[in-house]
């Protein structure tokens, strides 16, 4: 496997890890906040739940991308790759084509993974060259 392929695969794996970490790190406090308001993730209407899931996964993913040195454009594209599937899933719900929230959530996750990969394949140099795989310099205190 070439170095560029390894960089590309590592970036994809890091983004998936950040997404799932976000579901825990941000999803749990969001769940607690919902409980404090007398509701829960499962009691939310499916569309807000789908969008909430996109937020809890996108925020840490973009944070990690910034930490790795990616610019605003790459972060915006990757954010769009997360929200477009969420909006599409909500559209399927609103059109009455799919009513099962669990199925929509699974579909949203699969579509997010594919959409992320598509965004990366559109700009392979951004993700395969390793130029952004650096830890930003720390300013001594």
Image: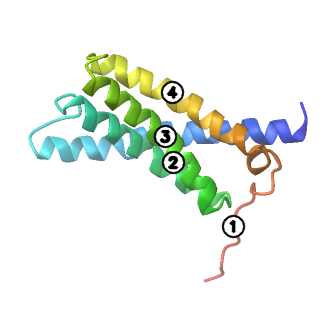
Q: Which residue is mark 3?
A: 82
Label 4 near label 3: C-beta < 8 Å? no
Check disc 4: other Cα within 10 Å, few if <14, some if 14-19, many if 20+. Answer: some
Q: Relative to residue 16, is residue 89 depicted above or below?
A: above
Label 4 near label 1: C-beta < 8 Å? no
Residue 29 image offset from top left, x and y in percent:
29, 47
Label 3 near label 2: C-beta < 8 Å? yes
Where is the C terminus found, in terms of image quarters?
bottom right
Residue 111 image offset from top left, x and y in percent:
51, 27
Q: Residue furthest left?
A: 38
Q: Residue at 37%, 25% (x, y): give it.
A: 105
The mark that comes first in sequence, 1 or 4, is 4
Check disc 3: other Cα within 10 Å, few if <14, some if 14-19, many if 20+. Answer: many
Where is the N terminus found, in terms of image quarters?
top right
**Disc 3 on helix, strand or loop?**
helix
Q: Which residue is mark 4?
A: 111
Q: Residue furthest front?
A: 95
The mark that comes first in sequence, 2 or 4, is 2
The mark that comes first in sequence, 3 or 4, is 3
**Cα–Cα span, label 1 and label 4:** 31 Å
**Cα–Cα span, label 2 and label 3:** 5 Å
Camera-nearest label, 1 or 4: 4
- In the rendered structure, the answer to whether residue 54 lies left or right of residue 44 reads right
Q: Quadrant of residue 24?
A: top left
Q: Which residue is mark 1?
A: 136
The label shown at residue 79 is 2
Q: Quadrant of residue 45?
A: top left
Q: Residue at 25%, 29% (x, y): give it.
A: 46
Check disc 1: other Cα within 10 Å, few if <14, some if 14-19, many if 20+. Answer: few
Label 3 near label 1: C-beta < 8 Å? no
**Cα–Cα span, label 1 and label 3:** 25 Å
Q: Residue furthest bottom?
A: 141
């Amino acid at each position: 496997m070439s170095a560029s392929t390894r960089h590309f695969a590592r970036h994809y794996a890091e983004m998936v890890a950040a997404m799932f970490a976000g579901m825990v790190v941000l999803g749990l406090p969001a769940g607690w906040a919902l409980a404090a308001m007398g509701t829960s993730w499962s009691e939310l209407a499916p569309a807000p739940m789908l969008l909430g899931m996109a937020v809890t996964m996108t925020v840490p993913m973009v944070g990690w991308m910034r930490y790795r040195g990616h610019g605003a454009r790459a972060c915006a594209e990757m954010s769009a790759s997360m929200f477009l599937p969420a909006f599409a899933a909500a559209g399927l719900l609103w059109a009455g084509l799919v009513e099962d929230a669990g199925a929509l959530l699974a579909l949203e996750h699969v579509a997010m993974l594919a959409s992320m990969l598509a965004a990366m394949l559109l700009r392979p140099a951004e993700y395969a060259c390793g130029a952004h795989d650096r830890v930003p310099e720390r300013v001594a205190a």
